[in-house]
Image (tube, coloured by chain):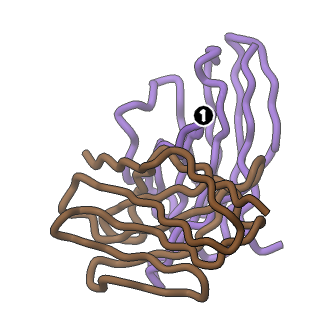
Chain colours: A purple, B brown
C-alpha cells in the first residue's frame, strides 16, 4: 500500500494519560500535515512539516500537543494529559512540493478519552 | 484567517438528477480549492480541485466552478448515483501545499 498510513487506528485512554500517534506519509512526500476532525465538522488544521522542519502550528493547538518528524519521513503526534475534549479523529495528510500536488489523507486515528 | 462556509448542510436528490454544492471563502489570497468526499468511517478523498487561474474544471460527471470576484466556488455532480451518497467537504488554501481550511461539510443523499 503506497498511501498514507496511520497507527493505531483506534485509541481509548483515560483522562490524564498521554497518547502518541504515528503517521507514515506517501514515500518522498516532503510535506506532512496533521488535522483533527470532530463529528459533523470538517478537518481542522493542527500543524505541518516540510521535511523535518515544523513550519506552522495552529493557534488552537494547546501546549499539551506536540508533533515531530525527526528524519523527515514519519511523524508522531503526542497529546499529554489528555482531556475529554481531545476525543476526535486525528488525520494525517502528505503532499509533494515538487509536483504541486494536493494533500492525500490517511485513514486517521480515532481517539476516545474517558 | 481564512473562513470557508458551505451550504446547504444536507442535500437529497433523486438518482439521475444533478446536485450542486456551494462554498464561499473569505481570504482573497486563497488560490487553491479542493473538494473531498468522505464516506462513513473512511478517509477524505480528493475528487476534484481547481486553481484560481481557471474558472471551471470537469472530470466526467463532476465539475467545479470558481468565481474569484464573489469568492465562491461550487461542485456540480451530474447523473447522480447512489454511490455518490457521502459527505462532501470544500476547502481553500494559499497554494496546494499549504494548510487547508475546510467547510463543515454537506451530506449528500442520492435516493434510488
The N terminus of chain B - image quarter:
top left
- Residue visible at 38% across and 53% down in the picture: A55
Q: Is residue B51 above or below residue B42?
A: below
Residues B85 and A72: in front is: B85
The C terminus of chain B - image quarter:
bottom right
The quadrant in which residue A37 appears is: top right
Residues A70 and A40: in front is: A40
* Crowdedness near tag 1: few (<14), some (14–19) or many (≥20) residues, C-alpha within 10 Å: some
Direction from residue B18 to residue B45 in the image, left or right = right
The tally of labels here is: 1
Report x, y in % for residue A24: 71, 59
Report x, y in % for residue A87: 66, 25
- Residue visible at 66% across and 72% down in the picture: B80
Which type of secondary structure does the marked residue at label 1 adopt? loop
- Residue visible at 37% across and 60% down in the picture: B92
Residues B71 and A49: in front is: B71
Direction from residue A95 to residue B103 in the image, left or right = left
Residues B15 and A78: in front is: B15
Q: Is residue B60 above or below residue A58?
A: below
- Residue visible at 45% across and 51% down in the picture: B102
Q: Is residue A51 above or below residue B78?
A: above
Report x, y in % for residue B28: 18, 61
Q: Is residue A36 above or below residue A23?
A: above
Chain ID of residue with mark 1? A
Report x, y in % for residue A27: 68, 74
Residue holding disc 1: A38
Amino acid at each position: 500500500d503506497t498511501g498514507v498510513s496511520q497507527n493505531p487506528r483506534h485509541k481509548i485512554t483515560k483522562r490524564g494519560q498521554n497518547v502518541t500517534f504515528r503517521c507514515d506519509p506517501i514515500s518522498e512526500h516532503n510535506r506532512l500535515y496533521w488535522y483533527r476532525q470532530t463529528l459533523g465538522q470538517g478537518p481542522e488544521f493542527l500543524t505541518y512539516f516540510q521535511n523535518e522542519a515544523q513550519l506552522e502550528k495552529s493557534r488552537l493547538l494547546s501546549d499539551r500537543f506536540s508533533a515531530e518528524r525527526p528524519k523527515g519521513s514519519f511523524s508522531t503526534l503526542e497529546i499529554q494529559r489528555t482531556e475529554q475534549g481531545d476525543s476526535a479523529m486525528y488525520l494525517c495528510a502528505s503532499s509533494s512540493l515538487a509536483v504541486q500536488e494536493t494533500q492525500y489523507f490517511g485513514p486517521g486515528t480515532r481517539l476516545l478519552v474517558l | 484567517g481564512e473562513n470557508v462556509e458551505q451550504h446547504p448542510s444536507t442535500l437529497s436528490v433523486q438518482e439521475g438528477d444533478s446536485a450542486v454544492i456551494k462554498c464561499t471563502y473569505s481570504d482573497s489570497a486563497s488560490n487553491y480549492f479542493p473538494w473531498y468526499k468522505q464516506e462513513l468511517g473512511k478517509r477524505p478523498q480528493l475528487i476534484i480541485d481547481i486553481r484560481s487561474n481557471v474558472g471551471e474544471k470537469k472530470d466526467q460527471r463532476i465539475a467545479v466552478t470558481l468565481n474569484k470576484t464573489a469568492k465562491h466556488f461550487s461542485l456540480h455532480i451530474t447523473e447522480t448515483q447512489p454511490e455518490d451518497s457521502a459527505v462532501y467537504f470544500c476547502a481553500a488554501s494559499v497554494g496546494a501545499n499549504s494548510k487547508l481550511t475546510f467547510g463543515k461539510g454537506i451530506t449528500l443523499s442520492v435516493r434510488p
